[in-house]
Amino acid sequence: MTDQNRVLARVESDMDGMVLGLQELVRQPSVSATGEGIEECARLV
């Protein structure tokens, strides 16, 4: 199996979890000008 095939297989097998994590990240409010939510957002990354 090539490296590319391994990466694609991993993405396919973990897609649901990756999407859930991304959804959680984009729902997190963060405003750099005020500092609101910055630490929480950083923990998600």
Image: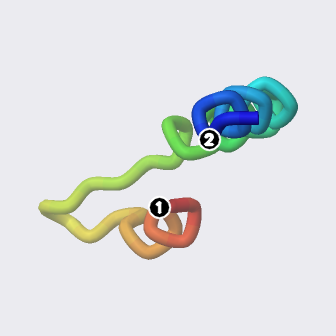
Left/right of residue 33 with respect to residue 7 in the rendered view = left
Q: In front of the other: label 1 or label 2?
A: 2
Which residue is under mark 1? Answer: 41
Q: Amino acid at mark 2?
A: Asp
Disc assigned to residue 33: none
The residue lying toward the viewer, choosing from 9 and 21, is 9
Characterize the local packing of mark 1: few (<14), some (14-19) or many (20 or more) Cα atoms within 10 angstroms.
some
Q: How far from the left and from the top, in percent, is residue 10?
A: 77, 38
In space, the residues marked 1 and 2 are separated at their CA atoms by 31 Å
Q: Quick one: SS at disc 2?
A: helix
Q: Is residue 9 above or below residue 24?
A: above
- The residue positioned 62% from the left and 41% from the top of the image is 3
Q: Quick one: SS at disc 1?
A: helix
The residue lying toward the viewer, choosing from 6 and 2, is 2
Q: Amino acid at mark 1?
A: Cys
Left/right of residue 12 with respect to residue 7 in the rendered view = right
Left/right of residue 17 with respect to residue 42 in the rendered view = right
| Res 22 quadrant in image | top right
Q: How far from the left and from the top, in percent, is residue 19?
A: 69, 29
Tell me which label, 1 or 2, sits earlier in the chain. 2
Q: How far from the left and from the top, in percent, is residue 15?
A: 76, 28
- The residue positioned 68% from the left and 43% from the top of the image is 21
Which residue is under mark 2? Answer: 3
| Res 20 quadrant in image | top right
In the displayed image of the protein, which residue is found farthest to the left? 33
Q: How far from the left and from the top, in percent, is residue 45?
A: 51, 61
- The residue positioned 45% from the left and 68% from the top of the image is 42
Total residue callouts: 2
Q: Quadrant of the N terminus?
A: top right
